[in-house]
């Protein structure tokens, strides 16, 4: 992949080929105790629940539109074309139509037997924000923060728990009726290949993304020993996501000027044991693009998470 300069001028993004831009990313650090660092998601100020320390690292960010095409199985991400007539300001239209469109899109590009969209977040980001960057939207609403901390959404321990959670009712989740029965969830976790794929897109019909774009880490440049878990401390449970040690061999990429009809698929978990599939845990982060101008438009985006259930393998 090469790189480019992304400039917003007069309603257009002008892409000028150049060397990879140097950008700042916030990397979580391993806890000296050897235990997973903790991030406080409870909303209170208890210092014992927050042991996370981040380090600001300057890395080259490559333009993934240039050079070798990226694919889910190798790199962990893939840019595809997708048209939609959904009104993203209408929660009913979003859930009734866009959910089905995304399930079909992911099925098409993964060969899945079944796809279940179980979560979405809309973001409207006007400016760069601090490394904490996590936000929770009210149902039908949006957040104004972009997550600009390097992270992966799931660990080998956490992803099966998330699947089992799709068989239980939840007040705060994206669904009122669980999409899976407990027996179905158990069968998926114990007997099936499954994955979780995110789909990220620009939802502005008026302007391409020119502020706080999303960077993704090429999975083919990451080794298992680079990864470590982070504990997420909620009021009623402890979850996990993934962090990574900064390495010079890592290759960060982004797609400058993403338009409304483009969708970025990236795989955040895959339980496959096939060594030829390296795209299993895609670390990602929003970042402050040095090419962003003062008059660049608000970044409007949606990300969805889709459970991917692959066909049963012949024994």
Image (spheres, rainbow, N blue to C red):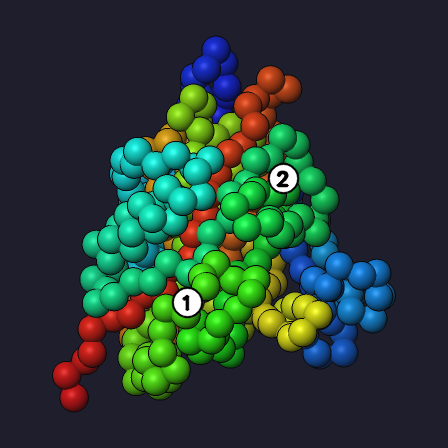
Q: Secondary structure at mark 1?
A: loop
Residue under label 2: 144
The image quadrant of residue 229 is bottom right
Residue under label 1: 177
Query: Which residue sits at x=57%, y=62%?
Result: 172
* Residue 266 placement (x, y as % from top left): 39, 54
Query: Which residue sits at x=46%, y=48%?
Result: 303
Query: Which residue sits at x=65%, y=75%?
Result: 237
* Residue 258 placement (x, y as % from top left): 41, 33
The image quadrant of residue 257 is top left
* Residue 148 placement (x, y as % from top left): 62, 47
Q: In the displayed image of the protein, which residue is found farthest to the bottom?
A: 315
Q: Name above or below for residue 60 compared with residue 234.
A: above
Q: Quadrant of the C terminus?
A: bottom left
User: Is residue 201 left or right of 309 when viewed as pictured?
Assistant: right
Using the rendered image of the protein, determine whether residue 211 is visible from the camera's viewpoint: yes
Cα separation, mark 1 vs mark 2, equals 28 Å
């Amino acid at each position: 992949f090469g790189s480019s300069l992304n400039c917003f001028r007069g309603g257009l993004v002008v892409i000028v080929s150049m060397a990879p831009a140097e950008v700042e990313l916030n990397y979580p650090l391993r806890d000296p105790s050897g235990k997973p660092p903790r991030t406080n998601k409870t909303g209170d100020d208890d210092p014992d629940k927050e042991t996370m320390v981040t380090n600001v690292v300057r890395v080259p960010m490559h333009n993934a539109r240039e050079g070798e095409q990226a694919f889910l199985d190798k790199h962990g991400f893939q840019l595809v074309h997708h048209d939609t007539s959904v009104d993203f300001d209408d929660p009913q239209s979003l859930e009734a139509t866009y959910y089905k469109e995304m399930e079909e899109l992911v099925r098409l590009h993964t060969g899945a037997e079944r796809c279940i969209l179980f979560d979405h977040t809309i973001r409207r980001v006007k400016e760069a924000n601090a490394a904490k960057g996590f936000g929770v939207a009210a149902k039908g609403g949006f957040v104004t923060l972009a997550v600009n901390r390097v992270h992966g959404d799931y660990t080998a321990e956490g992803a099966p728990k998330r699947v089992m959670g799709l068989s239980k009712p939840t007040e705060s989740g994206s669904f009122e009726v669980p999409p899976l029965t407990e027996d179905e969830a158990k069968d998926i976790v114990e007997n099936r290949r499954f994955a979780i794929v995110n789909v990220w897109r620009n939802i502005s019909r008026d302007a391409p993304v020119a502020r706080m774009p999303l960077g993704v880490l090429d999975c083919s440049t990451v080794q298992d020993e680079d990864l470590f878990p982070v504990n997420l401390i909620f009021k009623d449970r402890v979850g996990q996501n993934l962090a990574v040690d900064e390495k010079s061999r890592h290759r960060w990429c982004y797609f400058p000027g993403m338009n409304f009809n483009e969708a970025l698929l990236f795989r955040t978990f895959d339980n496959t044991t096939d060594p030829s599939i390296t795209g299993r845990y895609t670390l990602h982060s929003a970042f402050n693009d040095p090419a962003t101008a003062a008059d660049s438009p608000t970044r409007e985006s949606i990300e969805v998470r889709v459970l991917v259930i692959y066909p049963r393998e012949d024994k």
